[in-house]
Image: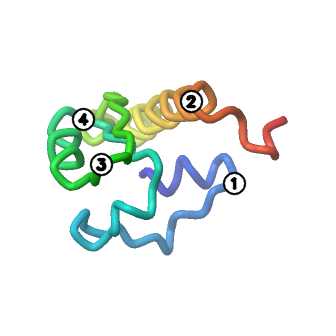
Amino acid sequence: MAAAVMQEVGVDLFDHAPRALDAIDPTMFEVIVALSGDARAVVESLAPEGVEVDDWPVSDPTLEEGSREQRLEAFRHTRRELEARITARFGPPPEWE
């Protein structure tokens, strides 16, 4: 569902494969965004000194029940939440300007 709603805005995630946190070098980042309290605790334990951890709790669309369209709308809502937070924190990407 995440891939479907991202495709609606021109982002193709259908071939994306998630990676475990321990497979990512946290020193490669200036900012790491945690989308839940549990994620923040894990990220803070892994993030080296100088890497900022932002806490962005958003609704979890995987908890939505109902029709396919209702579940897709939950994913769209979360996409919009993240778009707003990304824009507020980092500014709009060049193609949005």
Mark 1: secondary structure: loop
Q: Give me the residue at 42% from left, 51% from top.
A: 1
What is the spatial separation of the Cα atoms under label 2 and label 3, in whole angstroms?
21 Å
The amino acid on which the numbered mark 2 sits, given as a three-letter code, is Arg
The amino acid on which the numbered mark 4 sits, given as a three-letter code, is Ser
Mark 4 Cα-neighbour bin, 10 Å: few <14, some 14–19, many ≥20: some
Mark 1 Cα-neighbour bin, 10 Å: few <14, some 14–19, many ≥20: few
Residue 41 drawn at (x, y percent): 15, 40
Can you tell which quarter of the image residue 37 is in? Answer: top left
Cβ atoms under marks 2 and 3 closer than 8 Å:
no
What is the spatial separation of the Cα atoms under label 1 and label 2, in whole angstroms?
21 Å
The amino acid on which the numbered mark 1 sits, given as a three-letter code, is Gly
Q: In this figure, which residue is indicated by the disc labeled 1? A: 10
From the image, state whether disc 1 or disc 2 is nearer to you.
2
Mark 4: secondary structure: loop
Can you tell which quarter of the image residue 87 is in? Answer: top right
Q: Give me the residue at 56% from left, 34% from top.
A: 86
Residue 70 drawn at (x, y percent): 40, 32
